[in-house]
Image (cartoon, rainbow, N blue to C red):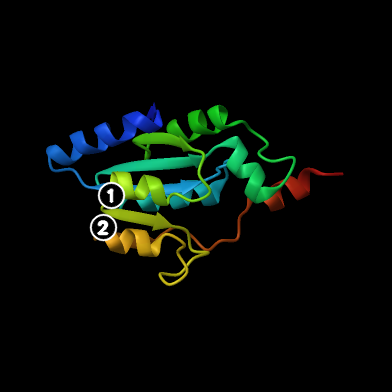
Amino acid sequence: MAHILLDNEIAAQVNADRAVGRTVAFANGAFDLLHVGHVRYLEAAKAEADRLVVAINSDASVRASKGEGRPILDEHARAEIVAALRCVDYVVIFDDRTVDRLLTRLRPDVHCKGTDYTLETVPERDTVRAYGGRIAIVGDPKDHSTTSLVGKLKP
């Protein structure tokens, strides 16, 4: 199982990996009701580097972006589920609106985004370019979503 680290612990772990020559990929999302699209995205992200850091939106940031009633699972449950995936090395929960602060702090070799983005539409592209990182669009076509799953569950 991956390590679930606090915000102040993740940088030290990434630096330790770098010190022994490992590369680092970074992926982020809410991961509310984990589905096959999430798994494919994270497996593809892991293929980009030796270590994969997954940043999970806090409950407050999910509510702010998805609305009331979300997330369905609390941040600790979501972190534990994602950490159980073989492809994930580290999980951190973040409370910011974007992952720019974490990207600047960790400086991952590659920032991975799903196929609902292009290199030009990645919100953090300027941050990644500023520190010399690379962006990779990974995963399968975005035809899976938690919102659609929730819709199917409602009577």
Kindly indicate whether the residue at mark 1 contacts the one at mark 2 (C-beta within 8 angstroms).
yes
* Type of the residue with mark 1: Arg
- Judging by the rendered image, the residue that carries numbered circle 1 is 107
- Of the residues under marks 2 and 1, which one precedes in the sequence? 1
Is 13 in front, or is 144? 13
Is 111 in front, or is 51? 111
Q: Position of residue 30 (x, y in %)?
A: 55, 44
Q: Position of residue 5 (x, y in %)?
A: 38, 28
Looking at the image, residue 47 lies above or below residue 84: below
- Judging by the rendered image, the residue that carries numbered circle 2 is 131
Is 131 in front, or is 20? 131
Looking at the image, residue 10 lies above or below residue 109: above
* Type of the residue with mark 2: Tyr
Give the Cα distance between marks 2 and 1: 7 Å
What number is the disc on residue 13? none
> Image quarter for residue 4?
top left
Looking at the image, residue 75 lies above or below residue 54: above
Farthest residue, direction left: 20
Q: Residue at x 51, y 39 (%)?
A: 95
